[in-house]
Image (tube, helix red, strand yellow):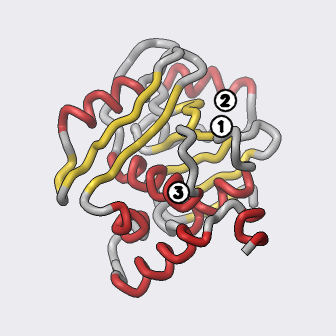
Amino acid sequence: MNSLRTAGVSRRGLLGIFAATVITAAPTCSNAFSFLKGAGDVRRIQMYSGRTGESLNSIYWIEGEYIPEALNEINYFMRDWRSDEVREMDPRTLDIAAAAHRLLDVDEPFMLLSGFRTKKTNAMLREGSRGVARNSLHIQGKAADLRLRSRSVGQIYRAAMACEAGGVGKYSRSNFVHMDCGPVRTWGG
């Protein structure tokens, strides 16, 4: 059991993975939904931004329905803070982040490093780093770069990969994990 804690996945989280896998064999885009089944009929996202000082603790889905007001609040929170431009975030990305957070069995909110990015912001970031994609899913509101103080990048990466629901990138030197609702793929591992 100690090896599970070391890996950053609790026994409860692991049991939830197995239970969700047995209960649902979802041929759809996201195993993240099955990992959220153990959460009841509620999905919650908890984040804070070191850039803006804002915090978010929002129930954004109840009994099979996304809550438009909560999604609007999340869209604003995940805006491009450099330009203050807001874009609708794809809720599937929220589902992946919420499922990974649940698997990690932590109370600590994610630190959001980057959600939506304008094309201008993305181009500026590309100039400073070869790790920024030209056609990043951040521009489409389909990606988030996240970290936790209490878990390693490797632990967060493995939890997000377990969702088998989109792209997961491991950026150890920059201390964050990229999660998106695009095609299932991984990098940096």
Closest to the observer: 108 or 147? 108
The furthest residue to the bottom: 22
Cα distance in 3D space between marks 1 and 2: 5 Å
Please state the total of marks drawn on the protein image. 3
Q: Residues within 10 Å of mark 2 (few under 14, many from 20)?
A: some
Mark 1 — residue?
Answer: 132
Between marks 1 and 3 in the image, the one whose residue lies nearer the viewer: 3
Q: Earlier in the sequence, mark 1 or mark 3?
A: 3
Q: Earlier in the sequence, mark 1 or mark 2?
A: 2
Residue at image coords 27%, 36%? 71
Under mark 3, the amino acid is: Ala
- Looking at the picture, does residue 137 appear above or below residue 128? below
* Whole-percent x, y for residue 166 in the image: 49, 60
Mark 3 — residue?
Answer: 100
Under mark 1, the amino acid is: Val
Label for residue 126?
2
Q: Secondary structure at mark 2?
A: helix
- Looking at the picture, does residue 159 appear above or below residue 115? below
In this orientation, does residue 135 appear? Answer: no
Closest to the observer: 102 or 164? 102
